[in-house]
Amino acid sequence: MPFTDNPKETLLFVDDEESILEVASEFFNAKGYHILTAKNGRIATDIIAGQKIDCCFTDINMPEMDGLELAEHIRMVDNTIPVIIMTGYPSLDNTIRTLKNGVVDFLIKPVNLNQLEICVKRVLRERQLFIKNIFLTKEVEGKQRIEHLNRELTYKVEELNTLNRIMTDFSTFGSSFDLFKRVVDLSTELTHADEACFYVINEAIQQPVEVARSVAGGNGGVQIQPDCSTRTDAGRCSPGLDINQLILDNCDEDKPLLIHENSHVQGLPEAIRSLMLVPLNIRRKVFGVLAVSVRNGTVRFSEKDLYYMSFMTNKAAYAIENIALYENIYENLLATLYAFVGAIEARDPYTEQHSNRVTRIAMALCQAMGGSQEEQDILNVAAQLHDIGKIGIRDDILLKPGSLTEEEFCIIKEHPVIGAKIVERLGLWDREKNIIRCHHERFDGKGYPDGLAGEAIPMLGRILSVADVYDAIASDRAYRKRMDEDKILHIMYSGSGSQFDAGVIDTFRSLYGQGVLKEIIQTTS
């Protein structure tokens, strides 16, 4: 460790993580700085009261006194001490609060030590200028310095706002298509580009495939183009503008590309004035490329634009991985649950394919009644799993060929509750769980397990009830053969308003008259 007769400034590091304090102390001691450390803001205030401090680095979340309180204390005691916040959990609210407390910079963990040293030199230089401005310079020079600091702070706030917006926008997505759409949307909006395209790299055909495109409209808005994955002009943001080879070269280099001004760049059409290509990596492999371009006007891309696009594709990559993981887990859970249902139906050859038929009947009813796509998706899962609770019913009861005793029937009636609990523990399908639980409720309140009546029964549950009963009486069972058609219709129609919702039965009557329901019974096997 070097020693000098004239040691550098004193730096105070405040953090409740010992490892961070140790690493910072060792690094900056080696650089000749005098280092002090504190585990929280309260200890730091005692150090500041007794020693001269030139710069303070502090975490936000700490016991006894957090970083924001410490920053306010320093501002009140000596506003010439620069305070730099280091945090692993940035937020716009914290950023604004720190700026109000006089914080000069806001760093996101993990922080590179070399970058940290550059930051130290910058803030210390600014501190020297600030002190000189207070004590030595003229009033005009002081005003100019303050205005310069204000511009820096404004720029920093704008930058943090942009980064925070990107992080927020990519926190939740329902599908990868929505995510690609948001990537190109935000690209044109943040950079004022004329066009942004996202390409997926297809190794099989060795060419990029356009999956989303955003074009800045004449009114300043953004127009999303349809999925172009089947087009033959892959690698073209617009007709005749082939950047296919540039995109492939960018994939090979795996580095963001910025062309500020097109001065006869090889492979770049002259119509494109400025261009950015940013690869999106998943598991250290290029998955796709974001191409952002300017064709008209005076807008030219800068390093800052490239930084924003790189930051955005990084967040998008994490989101894509999360979507893929969720979809894989979701599909695996459904496959497991459907296997349970298959095992139940395999125990009783008379009920084989019952769940599939009920699902098809329920879906037909829902569609005919104008159910939304979301409702159809919910009903599809609930109908497939409506009898999953029978996995907990003994075979001697479930497969009994004769009539059930009252005690046995009470046990059978437990299967909706068992099924709902099985689904509930997965924590994914709340509405599906409720439909499974109430598929044996009656419109007049005489059903089970909760005795719900009328509108208290979810509409999808009322639809499922009609589908379940119809398939049960229109199919062979262990204790009886399939009922006659007249008897089937009598049971269904006479139950309108009592056992069943009258509106659902009206739709049932219509579909039955069209032959839709009989076809489902006959063809599902």
Image (tube, rainbow, N blue to C red):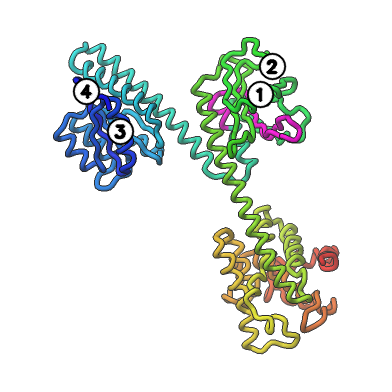
Q: Give the spatial CA distance, label 4 vs label 3.
A: 15 Å
Q: Is residue 409 left or right of residue 345?
A: left
Tell me which segment is drawn in magenta: 186-212
Between discs 4 and 3, the one toward the N terminus: 4
Q: Residues within 10 Å of mark 4 (few under 14, many from 20)?
A: few
- Helix, strand or loop under label 1: helix
Question: Mark 4–mark 1 contact, CB under 8 Å?
Answer: no
| Amino acid on which the number 4 mark rests in the picture | Pro
Residue kind at label 2, given as amino acid type: Gly
Residue 446 lies, in percent from the top left, at 62, 79
Can residue 217 be seen here? The reply is: no
Q: Tell me the residue at 73%/34% (across/down).
A: 228
Magenta highlight on residue 210:
yes
Q: Disc 4, disc 3: CB below 8 Å?
A: no
The residue shown at (36%, 34%) is 96
Can you tell which mark lies on residue 484?
none
Labels 2, 1: front one: 1
User: Which secondary structure lies at badge 2?
Assistant: loop
- For the residue pair 421 and 314, the one nearer the viewer reads as 314
Q: Tell me which numbered mark, 2 or 4, is placed earlier along the sequence.
A: 4
| Residue 146 visible from this viewpoint | yes
In which image quadrant can residue 227 be found? Answer: top right
Judging by the rendered image, the residue that carries numbered circle 2 is 267
Q: Which residue is mark 4?
A: 7
For disc 2, the neighbor class at 10 Å (few under 14, some 14 to 19, many from 20) is few
**What is the three-letter code of the residue carrying label 1?**
Asp
